[in-house]
Structures are given as C-alpha cells and as structure tokens.
Image (spheres, rainbow, N blue to C red):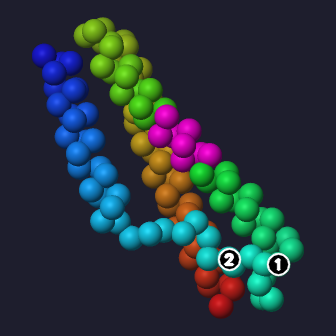
Amino acid sequence: MKITKALTAALIASVIVPGLAWAAPQVTPLPVKCNTEEISGIFCIIENVITTLLGVGGVIAFLFLVYGGLQYIISGGDEKAITVAKSTITYAALGLILILASILIINTVLSTFLK
C-alpha cells in the first residue's frame, strides 16, 4: 500500500514538476555581465565561483532529495528507516530552498550596487 502511494506520488510529481519548471520565469544566477567595459577582473571571478557553487549545491541537494525518496520507498515499513528517510527529504528540501533564496539575495544585492 505504501509503495503504491509513493509510486503514485512520484508519477504525479513527474508530470506536474516539468510543467511548473516550464511555466516559471527564467532565473539568472547573477546580474553581473562579465567581459564588458563596466565589469571585469575580480567581479567576473567571483561571479563564476558563486554560480558554480550554487549550481553544484543545487545538484547535490536534488540528489539527496531523490536518495531520501528512494530510502522512503524501500524502507519496508520500518519506522526507524522511515524517520531517517523523512529527515533526509526534509533537509534536502530545505537545502534547495536555501540555495534558491541565496540566488535571490545575491541578485538583489548585486543589482542594487551595480546600477
């Protein structure tokens, strides 16, 4: 029964999430334009480092989200395994939220100071 519910939820999510991603506005990690007359040098290096780290962090958080989901599916009703899986999913989702919030904060700060 639990596996059926988990597979149904995964199927629904696989149908809904791509549609939401397609409807979402494009988010650029940073508003800094490198290799222009206005911005160059250290700002480009910082922009590249931050963009790379946020991308890697997002991929890792997503992989942990998938791993937690797999843990939950194969837990077999064991309460301890379910608790571990739920905490993995919770922390991975919080990580994704923090990464998205940091992109928003960085965009806001840089667009304020670079106008």
Point out the tag, 2 or 1, that comes first from the N-terminus: 2
Q: Is residue 105 visible?
A: no
46 left or right of 12 in image? right
Look at 17% across and 31% down and name the residue there: 8
37 left or right of 101 in image? right
Q: Crowding near pointer 1: few (<14 within 10 Å), some, many (20+)?
A: few
Q: Which residue is mark 2?
A: 32
Give the secondary structure at mark 1.
loop
Residue 70 x, y percent position in the rendering: 37, 22
Q: Amino acid at mark 2?
A: Val
Mark number for residue 74? none
Look at 50% across and 45% down and name the residue there: 95
Give the secondary structure at mark 2.
loop
Q: Which residue is mark 1?
A: 40
As drawn, 54 above or below 94 = below
Q: Amino acid at mark 1?
A: Ser
Quadrant in which the N terminus appears: top left
The magenta-colored residue range is 56-63
Quadrant in which the C terminus appears: bottom right
Spot the residue most to the left. Answer: 1
89 left or right of 95 in image? left
Q: Is residue 93 visible?
A: yes
Residue 93 x, y percent position in the rendering: 42, 42
Look at 56% across and 76% down and name the residue there: 108
Look at 29% across and 58% down and name the residue there: 20
Residue 68 x, y percent position in the rendering: 41, 27
As drawn, 36 above or below 97 = below
